[in-house]
Amino acid sequence: ICRTMAAENGLPPPAPPEEPLVVGRPNVLDVEGFLKDITEILSTRLLTNHGPFVVRLERAAAEYLGVAYVVAVANGTIGLELALRALDLAPGAEVLLPSFTFVATAHAVRNAGLKPVFVDVDEATHFPTPEMLARAATNKTRAVVAAHLWGRAGDAASLEAFAAARGWPVVYDSAHAFGARHADGAFCGGRGRAEVFSLHATKLLNSFEGGLVATNDATLAARVISTRNFGFAGQDTIAHGGTNAKLSEPHAALALRHLRCVDATISIYRRVARAYGDALRRRGLIPNLVTYWNEPRLDDERDTHAYVIVRVRPAFGLNRDAVMRALRDRGVHAKRYFFPGVHKQRPFLDCPALDLETTDALNSDILILPTGTVVSAADVERVVAALCDVRDHRRDYAAAPPLAPREFDTSHYAAALRTIGTERD
Ligand SMILES: Cc1ncc(COP(=O)(O)O)c(/C=N/[C@H]2[C@H](O)[C@@H](O)[C@@H](OP(=O)(O)OP(=O)(O)OC[C@H]3O[C@@H](n4cc(C)c(=O)[nH]c4=O)C[C@@H]3O)O[C@@H]2C)c1O
């Protein structure tokens, strides 16, 4: 199936008009191969507990990334938590991390018994700088977590140099960064004490759910292998704290099938990002009405363009939320990750969050547009045409009331919450 996808070299046929274009529609590749794997799993009855598909996935991912160890876990969030627990920091030790990330990053810090301290990010890279760490650091700071967002690696070298000089280990949330490369050309995966990838359904390299803890640190790898399995260190020996964070065989099998296609998948994401650049420029939307974050590096083979990011500029004549509502009326379900900001979320209001101007600015005007192996060239035209149409009909939306979060909450659990009658907010 990679061959046909690659042979097509174009993009898949456009989605039928009635189907909305959404951010996060999963890649589902090599279904035939996967169904063969499921038959094998069911016939061998090796369903989980570090079975052959998990072993194959870990080895194939380590080989692809060029790292010594990859440990498969149930999801990226628990992978981050276990990597942080493996650092053996004192309970309540302060960890510097960006607020401009998915809430999972902060949950993992807290769930590891540590205290999140939020730092700002750079406007161009969406990644924290040493200066931002310096501003938030105290004598209780013991580690740093940084997130490589949108399929682009941040400046890890300067961050690590700053942290190393203070004896702080660095763990990367690389949930978005599978296949992306650092400035030195190495794949994300081998820097810091560990880099943790998410294999969630909405990710470039996806399974149903899943995570990969990548590291060159044997001690950390051994600890995560043990803590994901209740802390076992032998048949009847529990060596330390633990949980059940194992990845099942079917999850591993789908991730392995997708890993074999990942270069073709990345080339499609890059092609979609370039198609957006052409269409946004051709229709006069950039640079004044929106800025296209991906544009400066459309030809940079280090980025995967796992996400397509624009910022709605004041000249557009409508704020980001009104544009999002108007796009939804036109069948384009854009996202406003990570609105309103992790530091503004109830569980984290007690965490220090100094000078987060760029984070607040990004959360006020960033818009994530649909991409992925399901998005065709015609779909890209449809999204950009919808943006133009919104621009042309901006007066219709100028008076639109601000959005209540639940209006945009298409996620399954919002529906689940509604069935049991408790609204999200
Ligand atoms: C920086 C960062 N760090 C850590 C993590 C944690 O990794 P994990 O523990 O999740 O492995 C994430 C996860 N980041 C992801 C989450 O994994 C995901 O749930 C998604 O959360 P939503 O976007 O709220 O998903 P949802 O609204 O349900 O789906 C998006 C669209 O995709 C469609 N969809 C979605 C799913 C899940 C599907 O199975 N099929 C499908 O068609 C429907 C919907 O319109 O977004 C986050 C950015 C992350 O972004």
Image (spheres, rainbow, N blue to C red):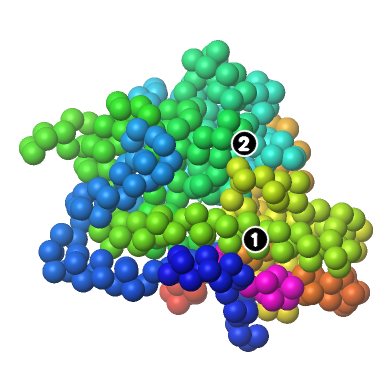
Magenta stretch bounds: 372-383
In the rendering, at what x and y percent does residue 340 appear?
Answer: 66, 52
Would residue 284 be found to the left or right of residue 147 on screen?
right
Query: Is 19 situated above or below 44?
Result: below
Q: Is residue 330 visible from the viewing direction of this image?
A: yes
Q: Give the amino acid type for the residue marked by disc 1 in the picture.
A: Arg
Q: Is 293 or 57 nearer to us in this picture?
A: 57
The residue tagged 1 is 271
The numbered disc on residue 154 is 2
Q: Are marks 2 and 1 in contact (CB under 8 Å)?
A: no
Residue drawn at (8%, 39%) of the image: 235
Can the viewer see residue 413 in this picture?
no
Q: Image point 25% across, 58% down: which residue?
A: 249
120 is higher (above) or lower (below) than 415: above
Question: Dot 2, crowdedness within 10 Å: few (<14), some or many (≥20)?
Answer: many
Residue 219 in the image, given as x and y percentages of width and height: 30, 26
Q: Is residue 2 left or right of residue 45?
A: right
N-terminal of the pair, mark 2 or mark 1, is 2
